[in-house]
Image: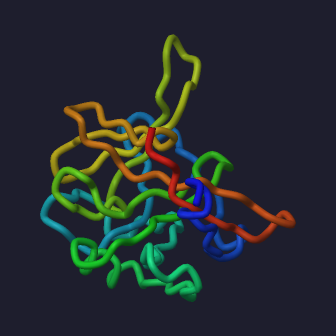
């Protein structure tokens, strides 16, 4: 069995359910672009009237059962059970669909509460990242690489089929 057979593609919903998250001028100045609006949390200083950028949370399939049905979780349900069950966080940032582990690998904090940002060098956008709001650790959305230590965020390949169906599978570890 090669690595691709061990990592099956899982249907994750429709691309149209993930409108693009674009940073506003205020977001750029504040250094934050929200993934999803979280329920109130002591670590977050968020305007309660701020509209939530859309994201989806699905239960990650077990490695054993590749025929599992997609099970979408509510935002609140996903955030409350993030350390109990593997989950995939899906969102579209700057017109690119991303699928990552919902749980921060540092302390299992829900990344749907995180902030997105562009990874730049001299004004040229090289990649995109997410910051966990609990301790401020950052992860590259394409590689999963952390800015601190050897922590690695789980990242999924995304395939949009027929222009609308989103399929994901965990990227192979290098």
Front-most of residues 86 and 120: 86
The image shows residue 23 at horizontal and vertical percentages of 53, 44
Vertical relation: 167 (above or below) 73: above
Q: Residue at x 61, y 72 (%)?
A: 10
Placement of the N terminus among the 4 image quadrants: bottom right
Question: Which quarter of the rendering shows the C terminus?
Answer: top left
User: Could you tell me which residue is drawn at 53 percent across and 44 percent down?
Assistant: 24
Residue 94 drawn at (x, y percent): 63, 45
Percent across and percent down for residue 153 are 35, 48
Residue extending furthest toward the front: 1
Q: Is residue 18 left or right of residue 136?
A: right
State which quadrant residue 49 falls in: bottom left
Q: Quadrant of residue 169?
A: bottom right
Residue 135 to residue 76: above or below: above
From the viewer's perspective, is 149 left or right of 142? left
Residue farthest toward the top in the current orientation of the protein: 122
Would you say 113 lies left or right of 14 here?
A: left
- Farthest residue toward the right? 162
Q: Position of residue 64 (x, y in %)?
A: 45, 79
* Nearer to us in this view, 92 or 13: 13
Q: How is the image coloured?
A: rainbow
Q: Residue at x 13, y 64 (%)?
A: 42
Residue visible at 57% across and 88% down in the picture: 69
């Amino acid at each position: 069995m090669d690595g691709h057979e061990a990592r099956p593609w899982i249907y994750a919903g429709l691309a149209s359910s993930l409108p693009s998250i674009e940073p506003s001028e205020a977001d750029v100045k504040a250094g934050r672009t929200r993934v999803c609006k979280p329920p109130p949390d002591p670590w977050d200083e968020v305007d309660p009237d701020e509209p939530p950028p859309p994201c989806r949370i699905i239960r990650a399939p077990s490695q054993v059962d590749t025929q599992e049905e997609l099970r979408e979780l509510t935002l609140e349900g996903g955030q409350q059970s993030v350390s109990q069950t593997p989950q995939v966080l899906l969102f579209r940032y700057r017109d690119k669909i991303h699928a990552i582990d919902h749980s921060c690998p540092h302390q299992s904090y829900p990344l749907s509460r995180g902030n997105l940002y562009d990874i730049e060098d001299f004004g040229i956008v090289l990649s995109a990242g997410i910051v966990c709001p609990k301790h401020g650790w950052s992860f590259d959305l394409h590689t999963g690489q952390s800015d601190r230590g050897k922590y690695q965020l789980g990242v999924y390949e995304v395939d949009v089929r027929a222009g609308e169906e989103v399929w994901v599978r965990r990227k192979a570890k290098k």
